[in-house]
Every structure is written in structure tokens, then in C-alpha cells.
Image (cartoon, rainbow, N blue to C red):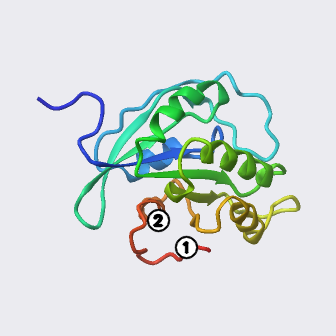
Amino acid sequence: MLPVLGARSIRQVSFVGPFGVGKTTAVCTVSDSDVATTEVMSSAMRARTGRHLKTTTTVGLEIGEWCAPDGKTVSVVGTPGQERFDLVRKSAMPRSTGVVLWLFGHHEAALLDAELWLEFISAEVPTSKLTVALTRLEGGPHTPQVREFRAVIDNCDPDIPLVMADPRDRDSVAEVLMAALRMPMMEKEVVG
């Protein structure tokens, strides 16, 4: 009998980060299996400067599977971005081989978000498990430069990989997963 929920693989990568950054999209984009999702209508639809607004939110774990280049299956777990669901996020991170912090590249509080999320995650798991994926780098007057994100990450741990990624692009998400699993990169270069 096939499991209804859960994963068959030994390796797991959890996606964490702010509400609406693209964690669910990334899980669905890269998964080679059907994804168990926990999306519901969002009550957080108030204006957020420089951030994409979405009508749904994740309230539990979203689980898919990705076949890595080495042929082994990796569980890909999306977690909620809202603070009220911290318990759900905290349940996924410790048992993960890698934890990916997805961050917005363009909004006024991007660097503060990076700092706060790094602090939160590093209190839960060793930074050796952590990778940062930076998305939405359209630019603009309030957009920090990649080197500014690198500086914030270096304050936490200079060995944390930083990858520019698009959660809607399968190859891009695969690169993020490979960085999280500390596998050799295919084409994209990891910054730092």
C-alpha cells in the first residue's frame, strides 16, 4: 500500500521563508510526484509594500518528491510563511537534510527580513544545513544589491550558500535543491 502522506526518501529539504515568496510554487514546480498541499484562503491580504499579494496561504506541510541527479529521491517540503504557523515550520526543519530560506530580492525590508529569518532558522537548526535562495530581483530604488544580502548572510555564517532562483522555473529550483544538498552545481554558480 502506498503512503497517503509523507515521504519514502531518506533526504529531505525544507523550504522556509516569508508569506508569498514562492515556497509552494517551488515545491510544485520541481516535484516529480503529486504534491500534498495545504493551501487555504488567506486572511493576510493586507497591503505589503513591494510584495506579491496572493489569495491563498499554506497552513501545514506541503510534500513533494524530486529525483536528484544521483538518481535518489529527495522529499521537498514547503512550510507556512506566517508567524502563527511557526510550530509547523519548526517540525520540518530539524529532520531535514537541508533547509532553504527563500527571500524576496525587492522590497524595502528585504535585508531586515533576511536578518530576522536567519536568526530564527539558526536558532532551530545548524547553519551548515542552510541555503538562501533569493528571488524577484527586478531592481528599483529600494532593491538591495546581491552583495548586501551576502553581507547579511556572512554575519550569520559565511559558509551559507546564496543562490539566485525563480520558484517558477524547474531548473532553477533544482539548482537550489542541489545547493541545499551540497551537491555539485549543474550550470548556475552559487554566490559565496
Return the residue found at the far left. Answer: 1
Return the residue found at the far right. Answer: 141
Residue 64: x percent and y percent? Answer: 35, 42
Toward the viewer: 143 or 13?
13
Residue at mark 2 to residue at mark 1: CA–CA distance: 8 Å
Q: Earlier in the sequence, mark 2 or mark 1?
A: 2
Provide the residue designation for mark 2.
179
Q: Residue at x 59, y 68 (%)?
A: 159
User: Could you tell me the amino acid type at mark 2?
Assistant: Ala
Toward the viewer: 45 or 134?
134
Residue 88: x percent and y percent? Answer: 51, 28
SS label for mark 2: helix
Q: Are marks 2 and 1 in contact (CB under 8 Å)?
A: yes
SS label for mark 1: loop
49 over 57 or under it: above or below: below
User: Could you tell me the amino acid type at mark 1?
Assistant: Val
Provide the residue designation for mark 1.
190
Toward the viewer: 153 or 30?
153
Q: Which mark is residue 19?
A: none
- Name the quarter where the C terminus is drawn: bottom right
- Name the quarter where the N terminus is drawn: top left
Q: Bin the neighbour count of mark 2 within 10 Å (Cα to Cα): few under 14, some 14-19, many 20 and up.
A: many
Q: Residue at x 47, y 65 (%)?
A: 179
Q: In the picture provided, is 100 more to the left or to the right than 83?
A: left
Q: Bin the neighbour count of mark 1 within 10 Å (Cα to Cα): few under 14, some 14-19, many 20 and up.
A: some
Residue 16: x percent and y percent? Answer: 56, 44
Q: Residue at x 64, y 24 (%)?
A: 84
Residue 158: x percent and y percent? Answer: 64, 68
Q: In the picture provided, is 55 more to the left or to the right than 89?
A: right
Q: How many marks?
A: 2
